[in-house]
Amino acid sequence: MIVGLFLLPPLAAWLAWDYLSSHGVTATTNNGELISPARPVDLSHLDYADGQSFGDLKGRWVFVVFSGAACDALCERQLYLTRQVRIGVNKDLPRVRRLLVVRGGEAVAMRKALEPAHPDLVVAGGAETALLSAFRGEGFAPDGSRFFLVDPLGNLMMFYTLDEQGNGVAQG
């Protein structure tokens, strides 16, 4: 009986791992596409608008949205989704930031236009070719149909399509 007491926990763990893993242990809720291997991106060389700085992003999870000279319907949808996800993380709100990279336009003007609806949004311009190439890969590009997640260490690790629901992004 004493031997059985010592063997029961490892045996139960082994059975649970083997027979329940497809429903629990290895099941994931990632709704975005994982970029493997993660690639480092340097967001410090962007021109940040209105006194914003790279320091606002350092050490935080960052949703990166790309826009042309004007924020079109795709851009607005991405900003809406990322805002809702950021609000949805509740107590971890300070750990998540949002960055809009404006290509071919004026970041300060874009910041002023979007500030009423997105006061927490960090806006930057001056995307270099090197930065844009870091956001290109097999099945993804900074083309306005996807938004990206950069981890606190500065690695591009996931991208999401506009089909994602906000709660699916928060769980992923």
Image (cartoon, rainbow, N blue to C red):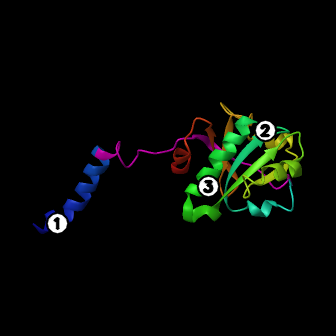
Helix, strand, or loop for circle 3? helix
- Which residue position is annotated with label 1? 5
Q: Quadrant of residue 142?
A: top right
- Please say whether residue 93 is visible from this viewpoint: yes
Residue at image coords 53%, 41%? 31
Viewer-closest of 29 and 116: 116
Q: Are marks 3 and 1 in contact (CB under 8 Å)?
A: no
Viewer-closest of 14 and 43: 43
Q: Are marks 2 and 3 in contact (CB under 8 Å)?
A: no
Q: Using the numbered discs, state the Cα–Cα distance from disc 1 to disc 2 in whole angstroms.
A: 58 Å
| Membership of 42 in magenta stretch | yes
What's drawn in magenta, residue-wise?
Answer: 20-47
- Which residue position is annotated with label 2? 133
Q: Nearer the viewer, mark 1 or mark 2?
A: 2
Is residue 171 rendered to the left or right of residue 152?
left
Task: Give percent across and percent down for residue 156.
Answer: 68, 47
Task: Give percent across and percent down for residue 46.
Answer: 85, 52
Callout 2, which amino acid?
Ser
Task: Give percent across and percent down for residue 39.
Answer: 69, 46
Callout 1, which amino acid?
Leu
Q: Which mark is residue 122?
A: none
Prevailing secondary structure of the magenta residues: loop
Residue at image coords 65%, 51%? 83
| Membership of 44 in magenta stretch | yes
Q: Using the numbered discs, state the Cα–Cα distance from disc 3 to disc 1 in whole angstroms.
A: 47 Å
On screen, 68 above or below 45? Answer: above
Q: Nearer the viewer, mark 2 or mark 3?
A: 3
**Mark 2 crowd level (few <14, some 14–19, many ≥20, 10 Å Cα):** few
